[in-house]
Amino acid sequence: MKTLLIKSLKALTLVFTITLIVLTVWANWESPKLSEKLNLKPINLVVFNLNKSISISDSTDITKNLISTNGVTACSVNPKSNAVSVTFYDDVITEGSLGKVIEGQSFKTSKVNFATIDGPKCPIPSEYIDGLTTLKRILCFR
Amino acid sequence: MKKSFFMLVVATLILGACKKEEEPQKSLYLRLGGNAAIQAVIDQFIANVAADARINAFFAQAAADPARLKKLRDNLVNQIGEATGGPEKYTGLDMKTAHKGMKITDAHFNALVEDLSLALDKFSVPAMEKTELLTALGGMRADIVGQ
């Protein structure tokens, strides 16, 4: 009985060690992505629907006002869908402030809630991908 | 004297016949402006897609979650960086796996290319570089459309 227990423990330890070595080799096979090394500052995204049609001059004015706003990295005015989308740093400017910049052009804005849109999804669950990415980051020594 | 003159003529002909070694062309990555320029184009591309009612539903999950948006942005920067000869490495899912079951059509793909093209135009990317980039990425159509 005691011998069997010791043998089982030895086998488990061996399996665990081999698994750890294999995972470490996998995690260090490639150097980390350049984006991880550079640690790109995350951006936020907000899309506003507008209450009326957007003319070419409105589009130009809205774009000019948004791009000159501190914290905004990009903006897009889509006259076909009456939508304005903005990528920004949320530690510099808030969604509310961005909405006010647009409303300054006599528009009313309503934020698009993407969480309620049931669009096509990536077939691989994000938790699975996140788990692998986190494991790789922990075991990577490069 | 005649001999010296003759040798001078031969030497001149030989030197003149030597082709000047052409400078190797810079990679598309460097001609686009490197990582910083690609980041700026990707931010604009993301903004264009988010406002585009034809395809923004495909990106709803990323748009709703800042952590997923960061992953999408990083993956796009890495993908374009790698495709254009930069030091980035794309380590996301392969295109076929990532788009399986989404029923993406040619119209959806064309809309995406249009949004990317507009982003490149915003930064006045020259026509040659723009065409090279769109051609490099166009090769992914077969893996994305009809999955």
Image (cartoon, coloured by chain):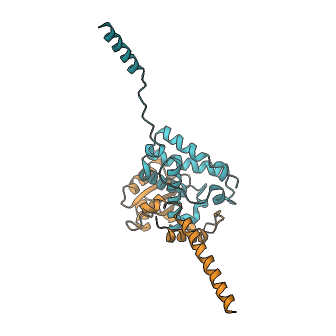
Q: Report the number of numbered marks.
A: 0
Quarter residue B136 falls in: top right
The one of B100 and B51 positioned closer to us in this rendering? B100
Left or right: A82 as drawn, with respect to B110: left
Q: Position of residue A87 (x, y in %)?
A: 46, 60
Q: Position of residue B66 (x, y in %)?
A: 50, 67
Q: Is residue A51 visible?
A: no
Quarter of the image containing the N terminus of chain B? top left
Q: Residue at x 58, y 76 (%)?
A: A17
Vertical order, A17 against B39 (above or below): below
The one of B20 and B83 positioned closer to us in this rendering? B20
Q: Position of residue A13 (x, y in %)?
A: 60, 80
Left or right: B91 as drawn, with respect to A104: right
Q: Is residue A89 visible?
A: yes
Q: Residue at x 57, y 42 (%)?
A: B135
The one of A3 and B28 positioned closer to us in this rendering? A3
Left or right: B35 as drawn, with respect to B60: left
Q: Residue at x 37, y 66 (%)?
A: A92
Q: Colour of chain B?
A: cyan
The one of B108 and A60 positioned closer to us in this rendering? B108
Q: Position of residue B26 (x, y in %)?
A: 44, 40
Left or right: B46 as drawn, with respect to A4: left
Q: Colour of chain A?
A: orange
Vertical order, A141 against A17 (above or below): above
